[in-house]
């Protein structure tokens, strides 16, 4: 009788804890540097989520090892909903193919919600003779190894984009790795490199100023922030889709009631007009409401792993 009463009491305590979640501030770990597209989105969401959750959501940048340091911290955290990871294709797809990780990107996390995606643009220096994507590819084929392509370091999305572009077009370029997007885009503006496949927020200010030219957006639909840029399907490179999608995860074993509250807070934030306007200004596209769910995030992550891991391994891409 005593044992049964104790068990019932414990169950009641656990139920009460779930009902009052969150009872204290939540930490949202961003495993990439402050000022990155992931960091900016995380901060916009965190600020709005506190209204739904009734507690502050504190963004903490935990960088290192291509994002695996912060991601690993969340994988090892107590699964109580108070330590979350805001990452995406880099942290939860690419890293697992280029690094020996002490965690599993699928088995050690609970998906919470997809948030937004940043399109990639195929851009070139202003003096590039090609007028459109078809003529750019033709020029590159006629001039193998003459053109240079700025990328991030090994294991980055932009480096993978460079590999994928050459594979799909049958071209050969000299890939020039940079530690940061700022240095790369500055060299493109200065004409020191010939082209890039870059995150749209990095390129858009220079495109609007006429300092570089854009050939296509690597997506199925045109960008709301730059509707004059054709899609790769329209420009002559069908199916060349790449994006820096972003999402929220919790440690494996986090109660589903907690996941539900976190997902509702993200959904509410993404429906807020001020949040939508802020992300649109940054060149980000918010996922449709029906895709802002844990199952949708799980499905996308698995499909991206199936797409990119074979390409990464065939190209023998390894992180530094």
Image: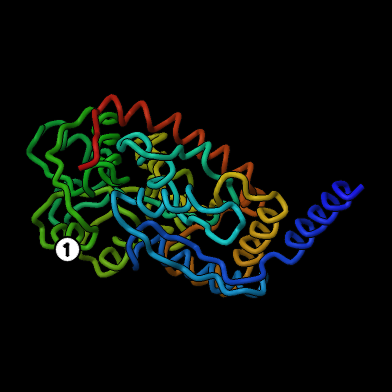
Residue placed under numbered mark 1 in the picture = 186
34 shown above or below 199: below
Numbered label tally:
1
Please state the horizontal and vertical placement of residue 205, each as a whole percent of the image. Answer: 30, 68
In the depicted view, which residue is nearer to us: 97 or 196? 97
In the depicted view, which residue is nearer to us: 172 or 31? 31
Q: Mark 1, residues whose alpha carbon is within 10 Å: few (<14), some, or many (≥20)?
A: some
Please state the horizontal and vertical placement of residue 294, each as a whole percent of the image. Answer: 63, 46
182 shown above or below 278: above
Residue drawn 92% across the image and 47% down it: 1
How did the renderer colour the structure? rainbow
Left or right of 111 in this view: 58 = left
Residue drawn 18% across the image and 49% down it: 150
Tag 1's secondary structure? helix
Q: Quadrant of the C terminus?
A: top left
Residue drawn 25% across the image and 70% down it: 209
Please state the horizontal and vertical placement of residue 81, each as a whole percent of the image. Answer: 60, 58
In the depicted view, which residue is nearer to us: 121 or 263? 263
Left or right of 315 in this view: 26 = right
Residue at the far right in the pictured view: 1
Please state the horizontal and vertical placement of residue 61, each as a whole percent of the image. Answer: 38, 64
In the depicted view, which residue is nearer to us: 147 or 266? 266
Left or right of 272 in this view: 129 = left
Left or right of 173 in this view: 74 = right
128 shown above or below 232: below
Residue drawn 34% across the image and 67% down it: 34
């Amino acid at each position: 009788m005593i044992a049964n009463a104790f068990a019932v009491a414990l169950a009641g305590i656990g139920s009460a804890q779930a009902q009052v979640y969150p009872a204290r501030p939540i930490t949202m770990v961003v495993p990439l540097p402050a000022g990155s597209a992931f960091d900016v989105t995380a901060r916009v969401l965190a600020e709005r989520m506190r209204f739904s959750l009734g507690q502050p959501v504190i963004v903490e940048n935990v960088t290192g090892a291509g994002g695996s340091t912060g991601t690993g911290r969340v994988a090892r955290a107590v699964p109580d909903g108070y330590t979350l990871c805001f990452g995406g294709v880099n942290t939860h797809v690419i890293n697992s193919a280029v690094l020996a990780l002490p965690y599993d990107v699928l088995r050690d996390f609970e998906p919470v919600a997809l948030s937004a995606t940043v399109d990639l643009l195929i851009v070139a220096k202003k003096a590039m003779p090609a007028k459109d994507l078809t003529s750019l590819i033709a020029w590159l084929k006629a001039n193998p190894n003459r053109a240079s392509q700025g990328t991030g370091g090994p294991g980055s999305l932009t480096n993978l984009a460079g590999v994928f572009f050459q594979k799909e077009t049958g071209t050969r370029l000299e890939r020039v790795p940079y530690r940061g997007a700022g240095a790369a885009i500055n060299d493109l503006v200065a004409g020191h490199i010939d082209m890039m496949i870059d995150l749209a927020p990095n390129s858009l200010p220079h495109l609007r100023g006429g300092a570089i030219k854009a050939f296509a957006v690597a997506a199925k639909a045109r960008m709301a922030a730059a509707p004059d840029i054709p899609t790769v399907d329209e420009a002559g490179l069908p199916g060349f889709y790449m994006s820096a999608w972003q999402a929220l995860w919790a440690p494996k074993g986090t109660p589903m009631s907690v996941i539900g509250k976190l997902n509702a807070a993200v959904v509410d934030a993404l429906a807020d007009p001020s949040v939508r306007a802020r992300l649109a200004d940054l060149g980000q596209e918010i996922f449709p409401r029906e895709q802002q769910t844990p199952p949708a995030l799980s499905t996308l992550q698995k499909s991206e792993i199936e797409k990119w891991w074979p390409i990464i391994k065939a190209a023998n891409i390894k992180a530094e």
